[in-house]
Image (cartoon, grey):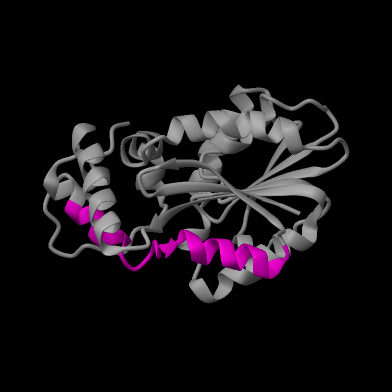
Amino acid sequence: MKDKIYSEPQSNIEDFVFDETVSQVFDDMVDRSVPGYRTLIANLGPIAAKFIMANTNCYDLGCSHGAAALSVYRHLPHKNVTIHAIDNAKAMIEQCNQLINEAKADDVIHTHISDIQDITVVNASIVLLNLTLQFIPIDQRSIVLESIFNGLIRGGVCVLTEKIIMPDEHSESLFQELHTNFKSANDYSDLEISQKRKSLENVLIRETLDIHTIRLRSVGFTTIIPWFQCFNFVSLLAIK
C-alpha cells in the first residue's frame, strides 16, 4: 500500500508509532523516505557472509518487516546459524512472519516481540541495528551497545545504521535540504513532509557521527568503519 498517512491536514499530530497503519505502508514509506535504503539492505547480506560464523547467532534488532534478516538469510554460508528478528511492534512482526514464511526461512529466522533493551545477545557473530538505535532514549543507548558487545564473539560485528546530525550548520542545512528534495522527488507533498517531521521530532533523536563513534569505542569496539552514507544516513561496521 502507498503511504498516505500524512496526506491530509491533521489538527493534532501525534508522536510517530509503528502501529498497524504504519505497518501496512511501511515498505513504501521507507523506500520513499530513506535514501539508499535498498542498496543498504542488499549489502547487509554480503557483509554478513563475511562475518557470520557457524554455530552462532545473528540478531536483527528492530527488524520491522525483516528486510535485513532476510538479506542475511539469502547469503548464509552456513546452515547451522540462527537469526533472531526482534521488534516491539506486533504489527511489524506479523508482517515479518508472513515474509519469512514466503521465503521458507522460518527454520532459520525466529521472530520475537520484545523491546531490544530486554534482549540478551548471546553467542552472536553479527548484530544489526538498522535505523533502530535512534528510537532508543539517549541515556539507554550505551547500555544497549554494551549488551551487544558482551554478546558478540571475538571478531563479531555490529552494523549500526543511523540518521545523523551533521557536524556543522552549513552541512546540516544542506543535507536536510537534499533529504527533503529526495522525499519530494518520491511524490511526498510539502504537507506530508512537514507533518511526518513533526510526528518524529520527539521520537527519532539524532546524534552526530562522532558521538556514535565515541560511544561504540567506550563500550569496547576497537575497529569502527563507516561503510555507507547517503546524505545524512550513515552505516558503521563496529568490529569486536
Instruction: Indicate the quadrant containing the C terminus: top left, top right, bottom left or bottom right.
Output: bottom right
In percent of width and height, residue 143 lies at 65, 71
In percent of width and height, residue 76 lies at 74, 27
Look at the image and tell me whether residue 117 can be seen: no
Q: Nearer the viewer, residue 167 or 92?
A: 167
Q: Nearer the viewer, residue 132 or 21?
A: 132
Q: Nearer the viewer, residue 83 or 171?
A: 171
Q: Residue at x 18, y 54 (%)?
A: 194
Q: Is residue 74 above or below residue 203?
A: above
Q: Nearer the viewer, residue 147 or 181?
A: 181
On the image, which quarter does residue 94 sit in?
top right
> Magenta segment range?
194-220
Look at the image and tell me whether residue 85 can be seen: yes
Q: Residue at x 79, y 58 (%)?
A: 151
Q: Residue at x 18, y 65 (%)?
A: 12
Instruction: Indicate the quadrant containing the N terminus: top left, top right, bottom left or bottom right.
Output: top left
> Overall secondary structure of the magenta stretch?
helix
84 in magenta: no
Q: Is residue 18 left or right of residue 111?
A: left
Q: Is residue 183 left or right of residue 134?
A: left
Q: Is residue 218 above or below residue 59?
A: below
In percent of width and height, residue 41 lies at 53, 33
In percent of width and height, residue 80 lies at 85, 32
Q: Residue at x 20, y 33 (%)?
A: 185
Q: Is residue 225 left or right of residue 231?
A: right
Q: Is residue 212 left or right of residue 47?
A: left
Counting every numbered tag in the picture gives 0
